[in-house]
């Protein structure tokens, strides 16, 4: 399926991970399957000890995500803040938990509502 993003709408997804390998593939796939595709998926990992980083590496090789591993454990709030700070500041920003599954219209619904406000 090919998606041609609207030139008026850029969406960045910021995700914070920590030992989320059990859920991560399904969550990333649900983001990739969105009706309205994000321009980027930025992930910051907080020093996971499971297979999270290997999963992120496999998606980065496909060009689906960009990920960074923190030098030290930051905790969930600071980790999300870091992930968000690495995204395109001109885009709308959606935060993604590592263990969520998004319905295919989540980003489109969010953008539709935000554009009403803008």
Image: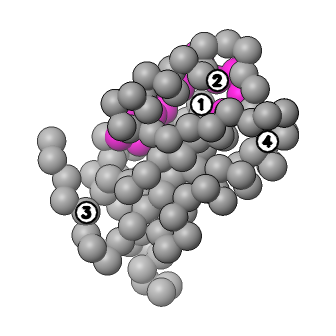
The magenta segment is 17-32
Which numbered disc flags the more N-terminal residue, 1 or 2? 2
x 58%, y 50%: residue: 14
Whether residues under marks 3 and 2 lie with C-beta atoms below 8 angstroms apart, the answer is no
Label 1 packing within 10 angstroms: few (<14), some (14-19), many (20+): some
* Any part of residue 100 in sight: yes
| Callout 3 crowding tier (Cα within 10 Å): few <14, some 14–19, many ≥20 | some
Main SS, magenta region, reads helix
Q: CA–CA distance between discs 4 and 1? A: 13 Å
Instruction: Point out the frontmost of discs 3 and 1.
Output: 3
Q: Is residue 89 magenta?
A: no
Disc 4 + disc 1, Cβ < 8 Å = no
Which residue is disc 4 drawn over?
Answer: 76
Q: Earlier in the sequence, mark 3 or mark 4?
A: 3
Q: Position of residue 96 (x, y in %)?
A: 57, 45
User: In terms of sequence position, does the residue under pointer 4 or pointer 1 come before the other?
Assistant: 4
* Up-down relation of residue 109 to residue 27 (above or below): below
> Of helix, strand and loop, which one carries label 1?
loop
Label 4 sits on a secondary structure element that is helix
Q: Which residue is mark 2?
A: 20
Q: If you read the primary sequence from the N terminus, does the residue marked by circle 3 or circle 2 appear first?
A: 3
Circle on res. 72: none
Contact, CB < 8 Å: mark 1 with mark 2? yes
Q: Is residue 33 above or below residue 3?
A: above
Q: Is residue 97 visible?
A: no
Say which residue appears at 44% left-offset and 32% top-offset. Answer: 60
> Decide: marks 3, 4 in contact (CB < 8 A)?
no
Please tell me which of labels 4 and 2 falls first in the chain.
Answer: 2
Q: CA distance from mark 3 to mark 2?
A: 29 Å
Q: Which residue is mark 1?
A: 99
- The x and y percentages for residue 31 are 41, 42
Total marks shown come to 4
């Amino acid at each position: 399926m090919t998606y041609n993003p609207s030139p008026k709408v850029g969406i960045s997804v910021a995700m914070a991970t920590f030992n989320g390998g059990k859920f991560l593939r399904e969550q990333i796939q649900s983001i990739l399957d969105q009706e309205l595709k994000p321009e980027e998926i930025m992930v910051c990992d907080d020093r996971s000890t499971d297979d999270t980083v290997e999963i992120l590496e496999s998606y980065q090789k496909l060009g689906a995500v960009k990920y960074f591993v923190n030098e030290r454990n930051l905790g969930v709030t600071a980790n999300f803040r870091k992930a968000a700070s690495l995204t395109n500041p001109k885009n709308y920003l959606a935060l993604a938990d590592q263990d969520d599954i998004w319905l295919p219209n989540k980003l489109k619904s969010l953008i539709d509502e935000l554009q009403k406000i803008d």
